[in-house]
């Protein structure tokens, strides 16, 4: 991976791409005040440097849930009995392998992990909980909180111009 030191234009490009990565190169170049060839070159360099991890479509979870018939979001605290490096890594590997796990954080203090789960319905949650929590003898405690309403969701990182 190429090592770069982003300048103000690069930071503007990254911010614009976070808002809408699907816009044309021409529109992106206009938004930051550079030529389209320069814009394309800079975006490719940001990708090669690993600052742009990937580009995805963000679906409207409520609309998808309405079309599929259900949708359940859970925020789950998980505490392990033993927290040595191998056991933490083993749980983390199992968690991120589950399709219903949208986010997985190792945290401190408090629980060992915070998970954000998106499943079809309560039976799907219970099946996931059985596989991930109940079947693991090292899982000591699980606290699940079920979302009633999502007021904010973004993948956008706050980018301020460097000092």
Image (spheres, helix red, strand yellow):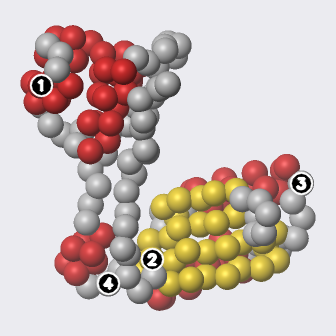
The reply to whether the C-beta atoms of the residues labelled 3 and 4 are less than 8 Å apart is no
Q: Residue furthest front?
A: 163
Q: Residues within 10 Å of mark 1 (few under 14, many from 20)?
A: few
Marks 2 and 1 sit apart, C-alpha to C-alpha, by 38 Å
Any part of residue 121 in sight: no
Marks 3 and 2 sit apart, C-alpha to C-alpha, by 29 Å
Residue at image location 45% in from the left, 77% down from the top: 73
Closest to the observer, 69 or 44: 44
State which tag comes first along the sequence, 4 or 1. Answer: 1
The reply to whether the C-beta atoms of the residues labelled 1 and 3 are less than 8 Å apart is no
Residue 55 location (% of width, % of height): 32, 39
Residue 147 location (% of width, % of height): 45, 82
- Say which residue label 3 marks: 84
State which tag comes first along the sequence, 3 or 4. Answer: 4
- Say which residue label 4 marks: 70
Q: Residues within 10 Å of mark 3 (few under 14, many from 20)?
A: few
- Say which residue label 1 marks: 30
| Rendered position, 39 above or below 92 | above
Q: Secondary structure at mark 3?
A: loop
């Amino acid at each position: 991976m190429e090592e770069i030191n982003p300048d103000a234009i690069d930071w503007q490009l990254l911010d614009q791409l976070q808002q809408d990565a699907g816009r044309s190169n021409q529109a992106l170049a206009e938004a930051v005040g550079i030529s389209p060839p320069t814009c394309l070159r800079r975006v490719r360099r940001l990708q090669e440097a690993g600052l742009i991890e990937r580009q995805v479509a963000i679906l409207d979870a409520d609309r998808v849930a309405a079309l599929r018939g259900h949708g359940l979001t859970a925020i789950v605290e998980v505490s392990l009995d033993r927290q040595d490096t191998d056991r933490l890594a083993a749980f983390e590997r199992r968690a991120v392998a589950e399709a219903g796990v949208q986010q997985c954080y190792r945290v401190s203090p408090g629980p060992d992990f915070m998970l954000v789960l998106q499943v079809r319905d309560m039976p799907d949650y219970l099946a996931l909980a059985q596989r991930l929590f109940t079947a693991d003898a090292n899982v000591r405690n699980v606290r699940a909180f079920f979302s009633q309403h999502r007021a904010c969701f973004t993948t956008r990182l706050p980018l301020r111009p460097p000092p």
